[in-house]
Image (cartoon, rainbow, N blue to C red):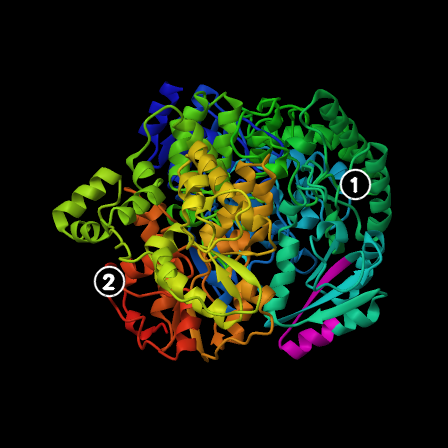
């Protein structure tokens, strides 16, 4: 390996990675398979590709091209050298609107091409559900299709010319009329014309095998088209000329409800006469909630286009009139259509979990039959599932007869793997009996290539092998795929994982307490690899900053998988490779909601840090910021706040404090409040109220850093008629809900003093033993509250999320933990549930800011949206992550990533805010990031409402207070 690495470093200008992390990141794609490569090369150009092939050919080392790694059949994994085209060869070389063509490199993500073509009214026709992370090279390798193939066909239909480097170094430009054909290919075809004319089924989604029929003279002897779908086994693509199509100016979506999936499938083919853009189908067992859909047990999504909205709608209504449905609707607004399509696009992930939470896997992900046969095929398919005791949720491209499905195979034990093989063999026979193709979109790979004789017969498969020999006589390129395939039940990625659950701190209730099962959640569909956040989405901010796989949720999950496997990553929880990959995880929890399968990398990171530093010295930041509640309480009790503020605002002292605490030197240490929230509470006069009792949680940030938020919340809650109390500070038997006032001698003698804490800072730094101690003490204090019906109002979103999720996960055997978690409400939820008749003051002005990432991921923001609307605060808050994320943005070495995260959505939203806009940021981290990077003061929604209630409007609360980042326009946004 070292000799090979040295030779490659000398031969190429691109990146060469033979380290553990580089290899571990590409052991898997989105399939069931795992292969460990020798190394990874990210070539810069075609010369680099040719150099890699030369070095590897001399040494007999296989080469596997790889794009976004979202392949579902295993073809993007390899045991030799993997070529990663996403890092450097990812450009749109040119776009010619007049000719309706584009020249692209193989690593270009599809959405980047779509964005460039859109201003010209053009688009690339095929659009897989992974369109925002799949690459053009991968699409050509798999002959991908997508939901619009009924209108625009497969990728092969959109390819004009391809630049390819062969395994022996030939540079070919493939096209029609035998252009670029390697020596011997034409002679091979001329000798097999009869077989090629009769041996391929006629159906729109025939992807399996080599497309040798494209080389027939009546088909234009199109070498480029024949190359599509070859899965990197014939040559290495370095550039492509692709055809663009005219995009409809307007679209409408007809959603048709049917009694069941068979009825929907039988209806699909009859709708093609209306010229739709899509005919997509899915059943109710795939939809978490059918709200917003017509009545029915299955649905067809039929999209129509036109030059105007009226024309598109008229075509959609014609579809409705021609369909025999249970219920139907037409959606014309873009937001409504996007919401519905999001359900369909996430299906590749959501289908990996059955309704009861059990796992389901690919393997028979995209069989295709003639559309007219789809209903009959689905009935037989369901019967075959039942005969094997298996379950699956079919969905997909009903208009093309292509069905996606994940099946609950047991791929962990020998008996389950044997059943997987038997089922696969029988299903291959069933598909071919219906005149279908084993693959209708994702390629054969390792999952289906072994079964190609069932579809084509032995003679045609032998012809495929001869074609492979013409292109790649040394079998250098992606061996084991398509021809001379590896067995479909070998190399399964689950076989290397521990058979017994590993000892962990969190409960992992959704995964049966098994950390391996939690890590297995990542199936590789790579939604976390999107380059831009859309709408309210958060996942994955660190990847969007660095663009590196190891900083994506998938990349981190892959390294954890390899850590558990112990083959590549051999030092387990002590692994530095895993620690480095997790270092830039912001613990934003965005993946918990945005990942289709609910990977929770923030929890996995905390788990890893807990074990990684067990019995060892931790980084300074874990002591300084991880134990922040201790230091802040100490400063408050000793009356040292003024001294602390004075010293940390002095240059040399602040520098020393930051250096000792592992804090980024670019950061300003926040000032502590002179009076804590609880101290203010004790001296205030309580308001008389007759409404429900609510317990306001004095989180560390509200208590010591921003007590104004707590004071404002009390003002608003009491104005809404609620009675407000704080949690008890004394633990004693039979004590009623306290208000932090009682000091009787008897109670002091029989009780212990304490403060509630959600444990957030301990959890985020992996100090889980300490977190459990803190949380148990908190539950002891909260027992009197739990004996009442009072909700617990938490103002800081990250603390609320910790109480709802981390608390019960860390203390799964303590019933009090689940009871407290169920009581936690946000500020807006409290007003909506416990003061439903209260009307907030009208503000009638725009609002800007960012929804806290933990609120988006765990708590939800629908009540906040309704409260803002009731108060006349207009506009949408930005998505993404502010980048500070608790201690992350303060930790040394994280400042650049933290700042770039803020520059993605939050800071531009504030800079572009209209005059007089309220700058909203419920999270302390978000407010701190705004102040330190943009000189803008953000406000909690409670502060905005409280000031309106008091009639004391603060003009220009968004005025600039500093200019740390050079951001402009901050003075245009004013809080209230």
Dot 1 lies on which element?
A: helix
User: Circle 2 — which element?
Assistant: loop
Left of 399 or right of it: where is 185?
left
Q: Position of residue 3 (x, y in %)?
A: 36, 19
Residue, far front:
746
Does the segment drawn in magenta span residue 11? no
Q: Mark 1 sits on what residue?
A: 198
The front one of 769 and 384 is: 769
Q: Confirm whether residue 72 shows in the render.
A: no
* Residue at 68%, 41% in the rendered image: 357
Query: What's the mark number on residue 966?
Result: 2
In the rendered image, residue 148, in percent from the top left (x then y), is placed at 65, 58
Task: Give percent across and percent down for residue 700.
Answer: 38, 50
Residue 777 position (above or below residue 375): above
Q: Residue at 49% x, 69% y: name it.
A: 718
**In the image, is residue 344 above or below residue 692?**
above
Is residue 675 in sight in this rendering? yes
């Amino acid at each position: 390996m070292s000799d090979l690495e040295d030779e490659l470093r000398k031969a190429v200008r691109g990146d060469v990675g033979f380290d553990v992390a580089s290899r571990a990141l590409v052991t898997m794609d989105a399939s069931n398979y795992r292969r460990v490569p020798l190394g990874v090369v990210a070539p810069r150009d075609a010369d680099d590709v040719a150099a890699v092939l030369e070095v590897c050919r001399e040494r007999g080392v296989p080469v596997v091209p790889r794009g976004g790694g979202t392949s579902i059949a295993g073809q993007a994994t390899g045991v030799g050298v993997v070529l990663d085209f996403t890092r450097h060869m990812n450009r749109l070389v040119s776009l010619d609107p007049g000719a309706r063509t584009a020249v692209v490199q193989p690593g270009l993500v599809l959405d980047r091409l779509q964005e460039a073509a859109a201003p010209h009214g053009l688009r690339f026709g095929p659009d897989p559900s992974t369109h925002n992370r799949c690459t053009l090279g991968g699409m050509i390798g798999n002959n991908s299709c997508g939901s619009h193939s009924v209108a625009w066909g497969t990728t092969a239909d959109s390819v004009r010319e391809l630049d390819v480097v062969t395994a022996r170094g030939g540079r070919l430009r493939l096209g029609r009329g035998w252009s670029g054909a390697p020596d011997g290919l034409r002679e091979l075809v001329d000798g097999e014309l009869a077989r090629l004319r009769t041996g391929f089924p006629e159906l729109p989604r025939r992807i399996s095998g080599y497309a040798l029929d494209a080389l027939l003279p009546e088909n234009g002897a199109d070498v480029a088209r024949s190359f599509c779908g070859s899965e990197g086994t014939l040559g290495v693509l370095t550039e492509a000329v692709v055809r663009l199509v005219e995009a409809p100016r307007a679209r409408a979506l007809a959603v048709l409800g049917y009694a069941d999936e068979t009825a929907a499938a039988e209806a699909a083919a009859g709708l093609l006469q209306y010229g739709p853009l899509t005919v997509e189908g899915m059943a109710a067992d795939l939809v978490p909630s059918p709200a917003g859909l017509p009545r029915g047990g299955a649905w067809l999504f039929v999209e129509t286009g036109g030059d105007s909205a009226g024309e598109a709608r008229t075509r959609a209504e014609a579809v409705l009139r021609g369909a025999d449905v249970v219920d139907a609707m037409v959606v014309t607004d873009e937001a409504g259509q996007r919401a519905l399509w999001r359900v369909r696009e996430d299906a590749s992930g959501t289908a990996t979990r059955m309704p009861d939470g059990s796992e389901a896997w690919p393997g028979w992900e995209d069989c295709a039959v003639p559309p007219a046969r789809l209903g009959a095929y689905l009935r037989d398919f369901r019967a075959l599932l039942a005969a094997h005791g298996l379950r699956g949720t079919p969905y997909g491209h009903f208009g093309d007869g292509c069905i996606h499905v994940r099946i609950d195979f047991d791929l962990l034990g020998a008996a389950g793997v044997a059943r997987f093989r038997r089922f696969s063999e029988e299903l291959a026979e069933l598909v071919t009996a219906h005149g279908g193709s084993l693959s209708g979109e994702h390629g054969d790979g390792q999952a289906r290539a072994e079964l190609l004789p069932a579809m084509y017969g032995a003679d045609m498969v032998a012809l495929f092998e001869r074609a492979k020999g013409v292109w790649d006589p040394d079998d250098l390129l992606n061996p084991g795929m398509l021809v001379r395939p590896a067995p479909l039940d070998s190399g399964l990625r689950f076989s290397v994982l521990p058979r017994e659950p590993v000892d962990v701190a969190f409960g992992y209730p959704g995964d049966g307490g098994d950390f391996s099962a939690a890590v297995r959640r990542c199936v590789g569909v790579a939604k976390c690899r999107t380059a831009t956040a859309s709408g309210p989405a958060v996942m994955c901010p660190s990847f969007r900053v660095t663009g590196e796989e190891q900083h994506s949720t998938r990349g981190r999950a892959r390294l954890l998988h390899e850590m558990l496997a112990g083959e590549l990553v051999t030092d387990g929880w002590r692994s530095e490779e895993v620690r480095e990959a997790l270092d830039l995880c912001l613990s934003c929890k965005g993946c918990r909601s945005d990942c289709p399968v609910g990977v929770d990398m923030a929890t996995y990171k905390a788990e890893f840090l807990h074990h990684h530093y067990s019995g060892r010295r931790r980084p300074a930041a874990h002591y300084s910021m991880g134990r922040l509640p201790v230091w802040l309480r100490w400063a408050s009790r000793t009356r040292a706040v003024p001294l602390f503020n004075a010293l940390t605002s002095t240059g040399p002292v602040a520098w020393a404090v930051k250096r000792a605490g592992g804090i980024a030197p670019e950061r300003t240490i926040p000032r502590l409040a002179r009076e804590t929230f609880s101290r203010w509470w004790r001296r205030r006069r309580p308001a008389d109220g007759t409404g429900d009792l609510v317990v306001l949680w004095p989180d560390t940030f509200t208590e010591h850093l921003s007590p104004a938020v707590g004071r404002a919340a009390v003002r608003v809650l009491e104005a809404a008629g609620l009675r407000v109390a704080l949690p008890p500070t004394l633990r004693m038997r039979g004590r009623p809900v306290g208000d932090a006032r009682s000091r009787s001698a008897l109670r002091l003698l029989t009780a212990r003093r304490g403060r509630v804490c959600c444990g957030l800072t301990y959890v985020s730094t992996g100090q889980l033993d300490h977190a459990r101690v803190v949380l148990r003490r908190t539950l002891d204090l909260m027992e009197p509250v739990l004996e009442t019906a009072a909700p617990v109002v938490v103002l800081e979103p990250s603390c609320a999320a910790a109480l709802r999720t981390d608390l019960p996960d860390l203390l799964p055997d303590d019933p009090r933990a689940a009871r407290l978690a169920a009581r936690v409400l946000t500020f807006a939820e409290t007003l909506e549930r416990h003061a439903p008749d209260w009307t907030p003051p009208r503000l009638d002005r725009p609002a800007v800011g960012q929804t806290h990432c933990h609120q988006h991921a765990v708590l939800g923001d629908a009540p906040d949206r309704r409260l803002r609307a009731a108060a006349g605060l207009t506009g949408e808050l930005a998505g993404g992550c502010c980048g500070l994320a608790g201690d992350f943005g303060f930790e040394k070495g994280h400042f650049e990533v933290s700042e770039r995260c803020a520059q993605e959505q939050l800071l531009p939203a504030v800079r572009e805010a209209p005059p007089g806009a309220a700058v909203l940021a419920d999270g302390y981290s978000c407010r701190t990031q705004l102040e330190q990077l943009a000189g803008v003061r953000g406000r909690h929604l409670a502060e905005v409402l409280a000031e309106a209630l008091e009639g004391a409007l603060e003009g220009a609360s968004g005025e600039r207070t500093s200019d740390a980042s050079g951001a402009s326009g901050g003075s245009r946004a004013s809080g209230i």
